[in-house]
Image: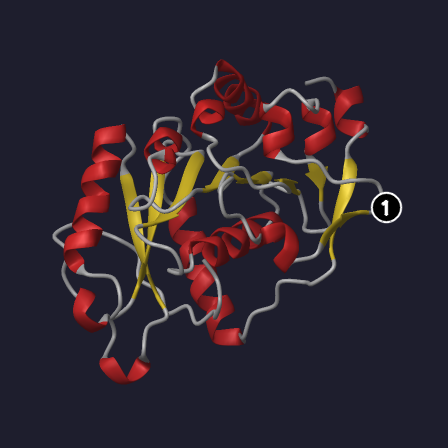
C-alpha cells in the first residue's frame, strides 16, 4: 500500500460516539494493558464469542478505541459479514458524505483497499467496516484475496483486531482464527453453558488460534467475582462489562 494511497483514505465519523461508564472504561483499560503484555509477536487478535449477544462487538470496538487513544497504531476489521450491526449502531459516515464501502465490497472485487479503509478521530485508529451483510461469506473468507488483505494490513499496524461471527453459529470464526495470533473469547456470565465455552476452546485449538484469554461479560456484582465461571482450567482475563444490546 503506497503512502499516496493512504493519504487518499477518507475519514470515517461516528454519528453515535461509543461512551462508557467509568467502571466499564476501567475494565476495558485493564484488558488493554493485559493485551499489551502479550509480546510483540501477538498482533492479529480475533475477538469472538460462542453464541450471539455475548458482547464481542462491544469488547472489540472499545478495546480498539482505547488502544488507539493510547497511541498504538491499530485497525479494527468488522468481519461479521453475516450479521454486522456496527455500521448502523454507530451511524458510521464519511466526512465528505460519500458512500461508505466495506469488507464485502473489497472481497467481492467491487472496491479497492484504499476505498474501504478509513481513518477515525481516535488517535491512530483506523477502521475497515462491513456495511453490507451477505448470506454466505464463507467463500470470500477462504479466498486468496482475504489472505492477501491480512498480509497487507499486518504490515502497517501494531494491532489488528477482528470482530468475528460467533463460533457456535457458523464456521467463519474458525477460518478467521487461522489467520490470527490469538483470540479473546467473550462469555456472557450466567448465560453461556460451560460445555459450550469448552467446545469453543476446542474449535480455536483446531484452527490453530491460541486462546489469549476470556472476557467474562455482564457480570452481576451480587453473584461474586466470576459467578459460575470461576474455573475453566485455562488462564484468561476477567472483566465486568455491562453493555446492553451488544453482540
At x 48%, y 70%, the residue is 244
Judge whether 105 appears above or below 129 on screen: above
How many marks do you count on the picture?
Answer: 1
Judge whether 18 appears above or below 94 on screen: below
**Circle 1 SS class:** loop
Q: Residue furthest bottom?
A: 222
Say left or right for 112 vs 62. Answer: right
Front residue of 227/32: it is 227
Q: Quadrant of residue 207?
A: top left
At x 68%, y 33%, the residue is 117
Q: How is the image coloured?
A: secondary structure
Where is mark 1, residue-wise? 97
Residue 71: % across, % down: 62, 46
Does residue 69 appear in this view? yes
Say left or right for 4 vs 170. Answer: right
Residue 121: % across, % down: 73, 50
Amino acid at each position: 500500500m503506497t503512502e499516496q494511497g493512504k493519504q487518499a483514505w477518507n475519514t470515517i465519523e461516528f454519528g453515535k460516539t461509543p461512551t462508557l461508564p467509568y467502571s466499564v472504561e476501567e475494565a476495558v483499560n485493564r484488558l488493554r494493558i493485559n493485551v499489551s503484555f502479550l509480546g510483540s509477536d501477538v498482533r492479529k487478535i480475533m475477538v469472538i464469542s460462542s453464541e450471539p449477544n455475548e458482547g464481542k462487538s462491544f469488547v472489540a470496538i472499545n478495546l480498539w478505541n482505547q488502544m488507539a487513544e493510547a497511541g498504538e497504531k491499530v485497525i479494527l476489521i468488522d468481519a461479521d459479514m453475516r450479521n454486522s450491526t456496527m455500521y448502523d449502531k454507530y451511524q458510521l459516515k464519511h466526512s465528505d458524505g460519500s458512500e461508505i464501502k466495506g469488507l464485502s465490497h473489497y472481497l467481492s472485487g467491487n472496491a479497492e483497499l484504499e476505498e474501504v479503509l478509513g481513518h477515525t478521530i481516535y488517535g491512530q485508529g483506523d477502521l475497515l467496516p462491513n456495511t453490507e451483510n451477505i448470506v454466505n461469506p464463507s467463500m470470500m473468507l477462504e479466498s486468496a484475496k482475504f489472505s492477501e488483505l491480512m498480509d497487507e494490513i499486518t504490515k502497517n499496524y501494531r494491532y489488528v483486531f477482528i470482530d468475528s461471527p460467533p463460533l457456535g453459529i457458523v464456521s467463519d470464526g474458525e477460518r478467521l482464527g487461522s489467520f490470527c495470533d490469538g483470540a479473546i473469547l467473550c462469555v456472557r456470565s450466567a448465560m453461556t453453558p460451560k460445555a459450550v465455552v469448552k467446545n469453543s476452546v476446542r474449535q480455536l485449538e483446531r484452527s490453530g488460534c491460541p486462546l489469549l484469554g476470556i472476557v467474562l461479560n455482564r457480570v452481576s456484582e451480587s453473584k461474586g467475582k466470576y459467578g459460575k465461571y470461576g474455573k475453566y482450567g485455562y488462564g484468561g482475563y476477567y472483566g465486568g462489562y455491562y453493555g446492553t444490546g451488544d453482540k
